[in-house]
Amino acid sequence: LVTLLCEGVSTRESSIDSKRDLEDALRSACNDFIEHTVVSLIAPVLTFIDQCKSHVTAANSSLGAEGGISSLRKQSFMDVEYVRAIVNRTLDRLEPELGELTTQMGLYMDNSATAGILLKPVIRKISRFLEEAKRFMSDGMVQDDQDDDGEAGGWNKEAMADVYNVMDQIETMVKAAAT
Protein backbone atom coordinates (compact mmCIF):
# COMPACT_ATOMS: atom_id res chain seq x y z
CA LEU A 1 0.00 0.00 0.00
CA VAL A 2 2.88 2.37 0.82
CA THR A 3 4.55 1.58 -2.52
CA LEU A 4 1.30 2.23 -4.30
CA LEU A 5 0.96 5.61 -2.64
CA CYS A 6 4.64 6.54 -3.30
CA GLU A 7 4.87 5.45 -6.91
CA GLY A 8 1.29 5.94 -7.94
CA VAL A 9 -0.75 3.80 -10.22
CA SER A 10 1.00 2.91 -13.41
CA THR A 11 -1.29 3.07 -16.38
CA ARG A 12 -0.35 2.99 -19.99
CA GLU A 13 -2.13 5.52 -22.05
CA SER A 14 -2.75 4.62 -25.58
CA SER A 15 -4.20 7.32 -27.67
CA ILE A 16 -4.76 7.23 -31.33
CA ASP A 17 -4.06 10.38 -33.21
CA SER A 18 -6.28 9.76 -36.19
CA LYS A 19 -5.54 13.14 -37.74
CA ARG A 20 -1.80 12.41 -37.77
CA ASP A 21 -2.43 8.91 -39.14
CA LEU A 22 -4.63 10.35 -41.88
CA GLU A 23 -2.00 12.98 -42.77
CA ASP A 24 0.70 10.28 -42.90
CA ALA A 25 -1.45 8.10 -45.14
CA LEU A 26 -2.26 11.04 -47.42
CA ARG A 27 1.41 12.08 -47.61
CA SER A 28 2.42 8.53 -48.46
CA ALA A 29 -0.28 8.21 -51.12
CA CYS A 30 0.72 11.54 -52.71
CA ASN A 31 4.40 10.57 -52.75
CA ASP A 32 3.53 7.22 -54.34
CA PHE A 33 1.40 9.02 -56.93
CA ILE A 34 4.20 11.47 -57.74
CA GLU A 35 6.81 8.71 -58.13
CA HIS A 36 4.51 6.53 -60.24
CA THR A 37 3.50 9.45 -62.47
CA VAL A 38 7.07 10.58 -63.10
CA VAL A 39 8.14 7.04 -63.98
CA SER A 40 5.16 6.48 -66.27
CA LEU A 41 5.72 9.78 -68.12
CA ILE A 42 9.50 9.74 -68.66
CA ALA A 43 10.62 6.14 -68.11
CA PRO A 44 13.07 6.04 -71.06
CA VAL A 45 14.85 9.18 -69.84
CA LEU A 46 15.06 7.75 -66.32
CA THR A 47 16.62 4.57 -67.71
CA PHE A 48 19.21 6.67 -69.56
CA ILE A 49 20.03 8.61 -66.36
CA ASP A 50 20.37 5.36 -64.40
CA GLN A 51 22.74 3.99 -67.06
CA CYS A 52 24.87 7.14 -66.86
CA LYS A 53 24.91 7.16 -63.05
CA SER A 54 25.80 3.48 -62.86
CA HIS A 55 28.64 3.87 -65.32
CA VAL A 56 30.03 6.99 -63.64
CA THR A 57 29.87 5.37 -60.20
CA ALA A 58 31.58 2.20 -61.40
CA ALA A 59 34.21 4.10 -63.37
CA ASN A 60 34.90 6.50 -60.50
CA SER A 61 35.58 3.61 -58.18
CA SER A 62 38.05 2.04 -60.60
CA LEU A 63 39.48 5.05 -62.48
CA GLY A 64 39.24 7.88 -59.95
CA ALA A 65 37.08 10.96 -59.61
CA GLU A 66 37.29 12.18 -63.21
CA GLY A 67 37.49 8.74 -64.82
CA GLY A 68 33.73 8.22 -64.84
CA ILE A 69 32.88 11.37 -66.75
CA SER A 70 35.71 11.02 -69.25
CA SER A 71 34.83 7.40 -70.04
CA LEU A 72 31.08 8.15 -70.15
CA ARG A 73 31.27 9.57 -73.68
CA LYS A 74 32.67 6.27 -74.98
CA GLN A 75 29.65 4.24 -73.87
CA SER A 76 27.15 2.96 -76.44
CA PHE A 77 24.22 4.51 -74.58
CA MET A 78 25.80 7.95 -75.14
CA ASP A 79 25.61 7.62 -78.93
CA VAL A 80 23.63 10.49 -80.41
CA GLU A 81 21.18 8.23 -82.24
CA TYR A 82 20.50 6.20 -79.11
CA VAL A 83 19.82 9.37 -77.06
CA ARG A 84 17.66 10.80 -79.85
CA ALA A 85 15.62 7.59 -79.84
CA ILE A 86 15.18 7.84 -76.07
CA VAL A 87 13.90 11.41 -76.05
CA ASN A 88 11.72 10.85 -79.13
CA ARG A 89 10.20 7.71 -77.57
CA THR A 90 9.50 9.69 -74.40
CA LEU A 91 7.86 12.47 -76.41
CA ASP A 92 5.78 9.99 -78.45
CA ARG A 93 4.52 8.25 -75.29
CA LEU A 94 3.88 11.49 -73.44
CA GLU A 95 0.66 12.64 -75.10
CA PRO A 96 -1.29 9.40 -74.55
CA GLU A 97 0.14 9.03 -71.02
CA LEU A 98 -0.84 12.60 -70.12
CA GLY A 99 -4.31 12.04 -71.59
CA GLU A 100 -4.79 8.94 -69.47
CA LEU A 101 -3.45 10.75 -66.41
CA THR A 102 -5.81 13.70 -66.76
CA THR A 103 -8.74 11.37 -67.43
CA GLN A 104 -8.01 9.32 -64.31
CA MET A 105 -7.49 12.43 -62.18
CA GLY A 106 -10.78 13.86 -63.50
CA LEU A 107 -12.61 10.80 -62.21
CA TYR A 108 -11.50 11.46 -58.64
CA MET A 109 -11.10 15.24 -58.53
CA ASP A 110 -13.82 17.69 -59.43
CA ASN A 111 -11.56 20.71 -59.12
CA SER A 112 -8.84 21.20 -61.73
CA ALA A 113 -6.95 23.46 -59.30
CA THR A 114 -6.50 20.49 -56.97
CA ALA A 115 -5.15 18.40 -59.83
CA GLY A 116 -2.78 21.24 -60.72
CA ILE A 117 -1.50 21.37 -57.15
CA LEU A 118 -0.90 17.62 -57.16
CA LEU A 119 0.93 17.82 -60.50
CA LYS A 120 3.34 20.59 -59.44
CA PRO A 121 5.79 18.23 -57.71
CA VAL A 122 5.58 15.93 -60.75
CA ILE A 123 6.56 18.83 -63.01
CA ARG A 124 9.44 19.81 -60.71
CA LYS A 125 10.79 16.25 -60.64
CA ILE A 126 10.52 15.86 -64.39
CA SER A 127 12.31 19.18 -64.90
CA ARG A 128 15.11 18.08 -62.56
CA PHE A 129 15.48 14.75 -64.34
CA LEU A 130 15.58 16.42 -67.76
CA GLU A 131 18.27 18.82 -66.53
CA GLU A 132 20.25 15.89 -65.17
CA ALA A 133 20.00 14.11 -68.52
CA LYS A 134 21.19 17.27 -70.27
CA ARG A 135 24.20 17.43 -67.95
CA PHE A 136 25.14 13.86 -68.81
CA MET A 137 24.75 14.64 -72.52
CA SER A 138 26.91 17.75 -72.18
CA ASP A 139 29.56 15.65 -70.46
CA GLY A 140 29.35 13.22 -73.38
CA MET A 141 30.11 15.97 -75.88
CA VAL A 142 33.67 17.04 -75.13
CA GLN A 143 36.22 18.70 -77.34
CA ASP A 144 39.28 16.50 -76.76
CA ASP A 145 37.85 13.25 -78.18
CA GLN A 146 36.48 14.75 -81.37
CA ASP A 147 36.59 13.07 -84.74
CA ASP A 148 38.12 14.82 -87.74
CA ASP A 149 34.77 16.41 -88.58
CA GLY A 150 34.49 18.07 -85.15
CA GLU A 151 32.04 15.59 -83.61
CA ALA A 152 32.45 13.63 -80.39
CA GLY A 153 30.66 10.26 -80.48
CA GLY A 154 28.24 11.54 -83.10
CA TRP A 155 27.48 14.65 -81.06
CA ASN A 156 27.73 18.08 -82.59
CA LYS A 157 26.04 21.36 -81.80
CA GLU A 158 23.15 20.63 -84.16
CA ALA A 159 22.50 17.18 -82.68
CA MET A 160 22.67 18.60 -79.18
CA ALA A 161 20.24 21.39 -80.12
CA ASP A 162 17.82 18.84 -81.63
CA VAL A 163 17.85 16.66 -78.52
CA TYR A 164 17.51 19.67 -76.21
CA ASN A 165 14.58 20.91 -78.30
CA VAL A 166 12.72 17.61 -77.88
CA MET A 167 13.45 17.68 -74.13
CA ASP A 168 12.06 21.22 -73.94
CA GLN A 169 8.93 20.00 -75.76
CA ILE A 170 8.54 17.24 -73.16
CA GLU A 171 8.79 19.75 -70.34
CA THR A 172 6.34 22.13 -72.03
CA MET A 173 3.77 19.37 -72.56
CA VAL A 174 3.97 18.30 -68.93
CA LYS A 175 3.59 21.88 -67.71
CA ALA A 176 0.62 22.43 -70.03
CA ALA A 177 -1.13 19.34 -68.63
CA ALA A 178 -1.06 20.85 -65.14
CA THR A 179 -2.96 23.98 -66.16
Image (cartoon, rainbow, N blue to C red):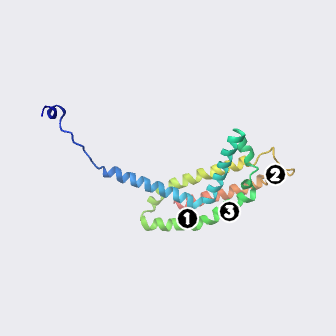
> Which residue is rendered at x = 77% and y = 46% of the image?
142
Distance (Cα) linking label 1 and label 3: 16 Å
* Picture coordinates of residue 122, whole percent (x, y): 53, 55
Q: Residues within 10 Å of mark 1 (few under 14, many from 20)?
A: some
Residue 98 is marked as 1
Q: Amino acid at mark 1?
A: Leu
| Dot 2 or dot 3, earlier in sequence | 3
Q: Amino acid at mark 2?
A: Glu
Q: Work out whether 3 lies above or below 54.
A: above
Q: Which residue is mark 2?
A: 151
**Callout 3: SS:** helix
Q: Which residue is mark 3?
A: 88
Q: Amino acid at mark 3?
A: Asn
| Dot 1 or dot 3, earlier in sequence | 3
* Picture coordinates of residue 169, whole percent (x, y): 64, 59
Is 107 placed left or right of 58 in the picture?
left
Is 42 placed left or right of 25 in the picture?
right
Distance (Cα) linking label 1 and label 2: 36 Å
56 or 118, which lies in front? 56
**Callout 1: SS:** helix
| Dot 1 or dot 2, earlier in sequence | 1
Q: Residues within 10 Å of mark 3 (few under 14, many from 20)?
A: some
Q: Work out whether 4 lies above or below 56.
A: above
- Position of the N terminus by quadrant: top left
**Callout 2: SS:** loop
> Which residue is rendered at x = 55% and y = 57% of the image?
38
